[in-house]
Each structure stands twice: as C-alpha cells, then as structure tokens.
Amino acid sequence: MPLPFAAGLYKKAWLKNYALMLAGLLIDIDHLLADPIYYAERCSIGFHPLHTSLPIILYVMLLAHPKTRALGIGLCLHILLDGADCLI
C-alpha cells in the first residue's frame, strides 16, 4: 500500500520515502508479546501496545513535520489497514 503514496507524493526521492513508509510495518513487533502471537479473530487496534491510542496519536503527529512525514504516513496507513481488518 505505501508504494502508490511514495510514488505520488515523493517523485524525486520515492525510494527512500517508500523505505520509510515500509518501516511502519515494524510496529508489528509488538505481536510477539501476545499469546498466541497470531490469532485471526483478534483486533490489533487497542490490543497490542504499539496499536493503542497514545502511540497512534504520536504517529499522527509525525505527519506534521516534513522530515518525519513519510514514516508517519507508513505508520498511519498500517493502523488504518489494521483497523479495516477489525471491521471485516
């Protein structure tokens, strides 16, 4: 999902910004704290530590500064997609 955003928003430096957006996937490391690690019926939002309100507010705040915006986009996309999984 980050590729269209990186290509559309950062035409000159799309690869670097794409990598930063992909780094948003690293917040799934908190799934290792859960038992079981993967449970298809569980909603990540609000359950895993990096998927709770305070970190999500910080992810949104990253959007405000141009130097952190690409990472913020990646993290916010990650949270939005996890939220969509919760609805399905």
Image (cartoon, rainbow, N blue to C red):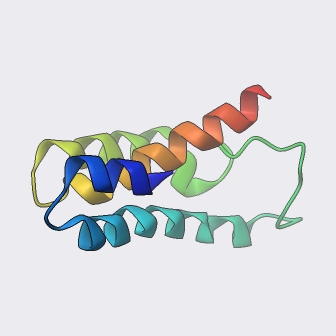
Q: In the rendered image, is residue 76 in sight?
A: yes
In-front residue for pair 14/86 = 14
Name of the residue lying farthest toward the left: 66
Query: Relative to 21, is 37 on the left or the right?
Result: right
In-front residue for pair 3/48 = 3
Residue at figure coordinates x 65%, y 53% from the top left: 48
Which quadrant of the figure contains the C terminus? top right
| Residue 7 in the image: above or below residue 36 | above
| Residue 79 in the image: above or below residue 37 | above
Q: In the rendered image, is residue 72 in sight?
A: no
Name of the residue lying farthest toward the top: 87
Quarter of the figure with residue 34: bottom right
Residue at figure coordinates x 52%, y 43% from the top left: 79
| Residue 60 in the image: above or below residue 50 | above
Query: Relative to 7, is 27 on the left or the right?
Result: right
The location of residue 41, given as percent across then percent down, is 90, 42
The location of residue 61, given as percent across then percent down, is 23, 43
Residue at figure coordinates x 63%, y 43% from the top left: 82
| Residue 4 in the image: above or below residue 18 | above
The location of residue 31, given as percent across then percent down, is 70, 65
Residue at figure coordinates x 42%, y 57% from the top left: 3
The location of residue 39, given as percent across then percent down, is 89, 55
Q: How many marks?
A: 0
